[in-house]
Image: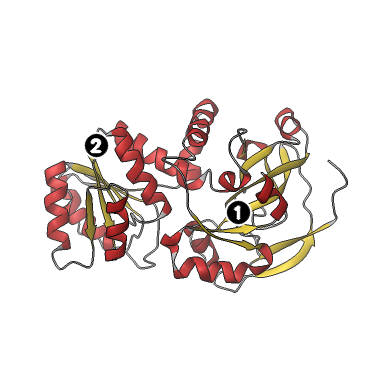
């Protein structure tokens, strides 16, 4: 694979809420069971924004952010799987307590890498894990819980649009919740049948009517805060609200009667915990299916590709218009262009 450099460019965060910096740091060395990935690209996800602000699992500071990405395995630590992956293009996820994907190189456990199929580019591979696997997990939850229909919040997001397409594929009605009329029009243009705007004066009444009509007893909450209480209040008896994001950045105040008399449930979803409960064969089946659907149901729109050195520009761009598509941090332009 050629000689590796001693240093690399990496994004670093010194403390929650601080501005990120791009610095020259040592290239990490893979330990037992790990590989070293020469990163091609990495998206900015809402979960990355949460990490930057101090929400969710934290790493020792200064920390390299970035949850997922893609690249080529260029070195391996001890172990059969690490050695097998050397030279392969992979989608990869960062380990919870070590450096993230917003760097030129990342050391991560080999089990957090998925070899890419020939028809899947490194650009597609950079966005192959977090949203697509979460979307598949939600439909697995719906199937296991025998939920007839789903309520999906933040429905114009990349994940929300995947849920729209998977709902059509599986014949599961989706009640899509958005915050702008332009998002209503966007989802209707995709073929979504039920789209509600939280800005409408009778939004709660509309949601209650549709949820009861369709028996939508699985409600996916990306915002938390006041919305969680609202979803629980209007949902049919026996419903489950799954909180998987914290975009609202505000406390949730829940009425106890919701649980006492109507047997509604409130639970959380965190993808690494979900995957940890599944056996390796199931995870491999899921990632294989994700790659098969990467160009259709699980496709992701990219609004801009930005060099790693311009990370603050990339963050500002993504936060200004998150529904326009992913902003990709590109660590190796030639790999993204060619692979």
> Residue 42's mark?
1
Q: Spot the residue most to the top.
A: 281
Q: Secondary structure at mark 1?
A: strand
Residue 118 position by quadrant: top right
| Res. 250 in view | yes
Q: Quadrant location of the N terminus? A: top right
* Viewer-side residue, 236 vs 102: 102
Residue at image coords 65%, 64%: 61
Q: In the displayed structure, would residue 227 be above or below residue 132?
A: below
- Image position of 85 (left or right of 51): right
Please state the horizontal and vertical placement of residue 92, each as a whole percent of the image.
Answer: 62, 44
Which residue is denoted by mark 2 in the rendering? 147
Q: Earlier in the sequence, mark 2 or mark 1?
A: 1
| Res. 106 in view | no
Q: In the displayed structure, would residue 6 be above or below residue 19?
A: above
Residue at image coords 88%, 47%: 3
| Camera-side mark, 2 or 1 | 1
Q: Secondary structure at mark 2?
A: loop
Please state the horizontal and vertical placement of residue 203, each as a whole percent of the image.
Answer: 17, 62
Q: Quadrant location of the C terminus? A: top right
Q: In the displayed structure, would residue 126 be above or below residue 205?
A: above
Q: Disc 2 and disc 1: Cα gap in Å?
A: 34 Å
Q: In the displayed structure, would residue 117 be above or below residue 228?
A: above
Please state the horizontal and vertical placement of residue 116, each as a whole percent of the image.
Answer: 61, 36
């Amino acid at each position: 694979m050629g000689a590796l450099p001693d240093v690399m460019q990496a994004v670093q965060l010194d403390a929650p809420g601080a501005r990120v910096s791009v610095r020259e740091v040592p290239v990490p060395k893979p330990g037992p069971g790990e590989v070293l990935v020469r990163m091609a690209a990495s998206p900015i996800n809402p979960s990355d924004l949460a990490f930057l602000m101090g929400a969710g699992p934290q790493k020792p500071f200064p920390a390299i952010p970035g949850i997922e990405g893609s690249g080529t395995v260029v070195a391996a630590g001890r172990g059969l799987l690490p050695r097998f992956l050397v030279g392969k293009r992979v989608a990869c996820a960062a380990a919870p307590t070590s450096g993230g994907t917003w760097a030129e190189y990342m050391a991560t456990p080999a089990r957090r890498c998925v070899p890419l199929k020939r028809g899947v580019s490194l650009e597609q591979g950079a966005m192959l894990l977090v949203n697509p696997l979460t979307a598949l997990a939600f439909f697995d939850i719906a199937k296991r819980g025998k939920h007839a229909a789903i309520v999906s919040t933040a429905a114009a997001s990349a994940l929300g649009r995947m849920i729209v397409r998977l709902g059509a594929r599986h014949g599961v009605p989706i009640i899509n919740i958005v915050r702008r009329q332009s998002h209503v029009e966007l989802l209707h243009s995709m073929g979504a049948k039920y789209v509600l705007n939280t800005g409408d004066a009778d939004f709660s009444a509309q949601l209650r009517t549709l949820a009861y009509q369709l028996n939508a007893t699985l409600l996916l909450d990306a915002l938390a805060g006041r919305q969680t209480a609202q979803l629980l209040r209007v949902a049919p008896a026996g419903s489950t609200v799954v909180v998987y994001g914290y975009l609202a950045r505000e406390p949730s105040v829940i009425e106890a009667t919701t649980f006492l008399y109507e047997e509604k449930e409130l639970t959380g979803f965190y993808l690494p915990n979900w995957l940890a409960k599944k056996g390796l064969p199931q995870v491999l089946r899921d990632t294989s299916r994700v790659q098969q659907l990467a160009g259709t149901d699980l496709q992701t729109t990219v609004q801009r590709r930005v060099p790693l050195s311009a990370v603050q520009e990339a963050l500002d761009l993504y936060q200004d218009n998150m529904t326009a598509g992913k902003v990709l941090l590109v660590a190796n332009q030639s790999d993204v262009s060619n692979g």
